[in-house]
Image (spheres, helix red, strand yellow):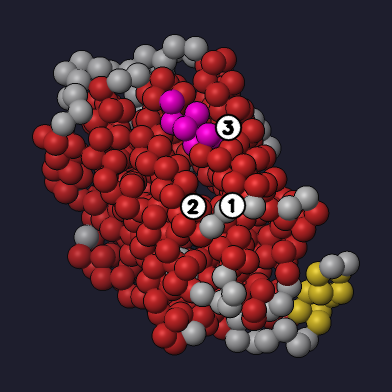
Amino acid sequence: MHIPPALRHRRYLYLWSGQLISIAGSQMQWAALHWHIRALSSEPNPLALGGIGLVRILPVIVFSFLGGPAADTYNRRRILFLTQTVMALAALALAALTFEGHITIWSIYLLTAVQAAAQAFDGPARQSLIPNIVPARDLPNAFSMSSIAMNTGAILGPVLSGVVIATLGQGYTYLFNALSFLAVLLALILMGAVTQDTRNAPGIHLSAALEGFRFIFSTQIILSTMLIDFVATFFASAKTMMPIVARDILHVGEIGYGWLSAAESIGSVIAGGVLSQVATLRRQGRLFLSAVTVFGLSAILFGFASRIGPTVVVLALPGLPVTLAFLVAFLALALGGAADAVSTIIRNTIRQLNTPDRLRGRMVSVNQIFFQGGPQLGEVEAGLVASLFGVPFAIISGGIGCLLGTFLIAIRWPELRRYNGDEHLAAPAPAA
C-alpha cells in the first residue's frame, strides 16, 4: 500500500477532499429525491420517477453549449465558485419548501433543473481543472481517486439518506446537502490561483461550441468511448426504479432503500481502491470493453433478483430483514458499480490525454451530454418500459440492450479494442 500519486499534489488533495464531502451530500439528496417523489405519489408511478431524469438532462443539453466554451475562456476555479453556490442555494430552497409543507413534484422538478443548469457549467470547469493541477503521468491515478471520492460519497449519501428520512425527516437531507457544498468552496479558497491555457480563448458563442463537437467526432478513440458510455447508461440505468423495487417489490423500507442505492458505489470504491494501487494500466481498450460488458450483465442479474420475491430470509438485521432477493440485488448492483468504476477511470484518462488544454472544457461539455444524457434519458426510457411491461422487464431488457450496443460499437471502432494506454508520453508536471 502507498499514498496514491495524485494525492501528493497539494491542490488536487484539497479539491479531492472537498468533493468527497460534497458528493456525499449530493448523493444523499439524489436518493432522497426519488424516495420523495414516490412518497408524494398515491401509488407506484414509474413515469413520475422517470421525469426527474428528463428535467435533469434538458438543462445539460442546452447549457453545455455554453459551459464548455466558458471553461476554456474564463478561470475554471472562479466558475466553480459560482456553480457550487447556485447548487447550494437550490438545495436550501428544497429544504425550506419541505419544512414548510409546500413541496410538490413540480417544485422538485424545477429546482432539480436549476441544479442541472449549474452542473452544465460545473462539470467542464471541474474536470478540465484536474489536468491543470496534476501532471499527465498521474492523471489515471487522479481519475481513480476522483472515482473513489465520487463513490465513497455515493455510499455514505444514500445510506445516510435512508437514516435521515426515517429519523429526522425528508427536509434534512436537502439541508445537509446545502451545507456540504461549503467543503468545495473552502477547498477552492485553499487551492489558490491555478494557471490554465487561455491563449486564443474561444469566447462563448456557437462556433466555439461547434469546434468542440468537430474535435470529438474527428477523434475516433474519444468518440467511441462516449458512444459506449451513452448506450450502456441509457439501457442499464437501474437506479430510477430503485424506490419501487425497494418499497413495492422487496418491501425493505427507507433503510433497505438506502443500502440498495449505495450498493453500486460500494463496488465502485472497492474497484477504485484496487486501481489506485496500480501504477500502470495496460490493454486499456480491452479492459474498458470487458468492464462495460460486466456492467450490462449485472443489470440483468439485478432484474432477475427483483423477481425472486421477499420470501426467503437469509439474515435478520434490526429494521432490515436480508432476504435472498435483497442479497442478490445488492451484490448485482455492487458488481455493476465495480465495472462502472473501471470503465469511468479508463475513459476519462483517454479523453483528457487525447485533448489539448485549450479544448478540454468543450470536450468535457460534449462528453457531459453523453455521460449525463445516457442515464437521464435512460430514466425516461425505463419509466416508459416499466409502465408498459413492469419493472423487472425494464431492468432486464436494459441490460440486454447495453450488451448489444457495446458489441456493435466495439465492432465499428476496432481501434478501441487495440488501445493500450501508453500511446502518450508524460507531460511536464504543473506547479504544485
Q: Position of residue 278 (x, y in %)?
A: 55, 42
Q: Position of residue 11 (x, y in %)?
A: 53, 20
Question: 348 or 366, which is in the foreground?
Answer: 366
What amino acid is found at the position of numbered circle 2 in the picture?
Ser
Q: Which numbered dot is residue 102?
A: 1
Q: What residue is shown with label 2?
A: 107
Q: Are marks 3 and 1 in contact (CB under 8 Å)?
A: no
Question: 63 or 76, which is in the foreground?
Answer: 63
Viewer-side label of 3, 1? 1
Query: In what element is the residue under mark 3?
Result: helix
Q: Position of residue 99 (x, y in %)?
A: 67, 47
Is any atom of residue 406 visible in this view? yes
Query: In what element is the residue under mark 1?
Result: loop
Q: Main secondary structure of the magenta part?
A: helix
User: Which residue appears at 40% of the width and 52% of the height?
Assistant: 56
What amino acid is found at the position of numbered circle 3 in the picture?
Phe
Q: Residue furthest left?
A: 207
Range of the magenta residues?
Answer: 82-89
Alpha carbon distance from label 3 to label 1: 24 Å
Q: What residue is shown with label 3?
A: 181
User: Which residue appears at 51% of the width and 75% of the height?
Assistant: 45
Q: Are marks 2 and 1 in contact (CB under 8 Å)?
A: yes
